[in-house]
Amino acid sequence: MERDLSTETKIKDAAKRIFITNGFNGCTSREIANEAGINVALLNYYFKSKGQLFDIIISSVLKDFTLSIIDVLKNNMSLINKVRILIEKEYEFLSKHPEIPNFIINELGKKDKNFFECLDIAEEFHKTKIFQEVLDAQTSGEMRKIDLVSLMLLMMSNCHFPFMAKPMIKTINSLEDAQYNEHLMVHKQYVTEMLINYLFPKNS
Amino acid sequence: MERDLSTETKIKDAAKRIFITNGFNGCTSREIANEAGINVALLNYYFKSKGQLFDIIISSVLKDFTLSIIDVLKNNMSLINKVRILIEKEYEFLSKHPEIPNFIINELGKKDKNFFECLDIAEEFHKTKIFQEVLDAQTSGEMRKIDLVSLMLLMMSNCHFPFMAKPMIKTINSLEDAQYNEHLMVHKQYVTEMLINYLFPKNS
DNA sequence: TTTTTGTTTAAACACACGTTTAAAAACAAT
DNA sequence: ATTGTTTTTAAACGTGTGTTTAAACAAAAA
């Protein structure tokens, strides 16, 4: 298991795991050092502080996360298929990293720093020309006329929340992990059908 | 402003405000004591520890939250109207307490204790006979045949997430608080229409 | 070999935390 | 007034935190 990774990446890997699952306040520097198999002092030797390490981690997570979306958006397919694939990929991504939505929403809410601006994410989105594509589909009548904020919310609500609420729903319904995962796969179909029907009324 | 409340309720009020906004790990006993205008030691005089105080607060929040739902469910109206009113009331409740969804999902995920069982919430739900009502509507064909977990997820996703993601979406789209609140009211209409159309196909 | 440079460590620092103690203050009963 | 009880406080305790220090270690340069 123990590869010959550089100390810096060992620390970053450990920090990412622990920060994502426990949050900034929910873990300690020593915990991260242990997970990385190094001394605490090395943390501040490679990164100046716990806070700076955290900023690096949250930036990288945010980048990975948005890239997986942009990757779909810049593909050459119809808007309706983009929505379909986006939901599919989103459920796929979140199945592997279910703690990320909670992590982003919680930790980003505390920070005053605008990581999206720092990472030029807005620009990356513009390059995909998705905004113009939506506008065109709305004027042609193919797509329902709703604003981009609501469109974003509809997509994210129905993709992210089922993963965020997993512990709660599991408790309420006394479900095992595997059972809930099955539910998720079924739910993905419902969500896809519902959103496609609503956003593209002609296609129902 | 300073009413003649008992010390115990002053502490509970302060604790509720601070726990909900900052979480258990995101605040200190002294912070709560300050907000309540009392000494730190009094916290452990009235409640044995920070943890016990937290359990009391999260129980009360959970109770308030579910009661607002049950209140609608036990009303005497058609299922389709219950869904409509439920969304309406949910957006109304969350407009007043927007931090609660995040609070519940985050803090409940950490605890191993099952607060829902402790508070007899399941029983309260059963009393409303909503489960039978859904089953009847599904066999009669009025309602789409989806499982209760997915039904719950659809409702919660589209009601809670828009409030949970408020800081993030505001940042991404450079929106002021008032602007986002306007978006929320519009979004509520979209969500209502989408869910009603999907859950009750005949009515579209 | 010696020196130099970059890594890693054990130990300590200063401080904030949750909690406890002992005494003061406020109040009630006799 | 005196006693007893409850409420409140200032101060301290022990522990865990993020961070720093100074020394040990390793690898390369001289």
Image (cartoon, coloured by chain):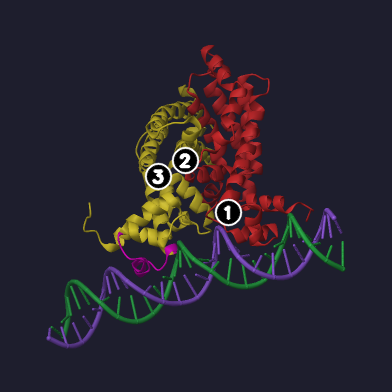
Chain colours: A yellow, B red, C purple, D green
Q: Quadrant of the N terminus of chain B?
A: bottom right
Q: Amino acid at mark 2?
A: Met
**Circle 3 is placed at which residue position?**
A128
A175 to B24, vertically: above or below:
above
Q: Quadrant of the C terminus of chain B?
A: top right
Picture residue at 53% right of the left edge, 58% below the top: A112
**Circle 1 is placed at which residue position?**
B50
User: For the residue carrying disc 3, how many other residues have a C-alpha within 10 Å: few (<14), some (14-19), or many (20+)?
Assistant: some
Picture residue at 52% right of the left edge, 40% below the top: A148
Q: Amino acid at mark 3?
A: Thr
Residue A151 appears at what percent x and percent y?
51, 37
> In the picture provided, is A155 more to the left or to the right than B42?
left
Residue A71 visible from this viewpoint? yes
Marked residue nearer the N-terminal end (2 or 3): 3
> In the picture provided, is B183 more to the left or to the right than B147?
right
Q: Which residues are magenta?
A: A37-51
Q: Is residue A38 magenta?
A: yes
The quarter holding residue B87 reads: top right
Element on which disc 3 rests: loop
Indicate which disc residue A164 carries: 2
Q: Nearest to the eye among marks 1 and 3: give it.
A: 1
A84 to B25, vertically: above or below:
above
Circles 1 and 3 in contact, beta carbons < 8 Å: no
Residue A134 appears at what percent x and percent y?
47, 37
Which chain's residue wears label 1?
A: B
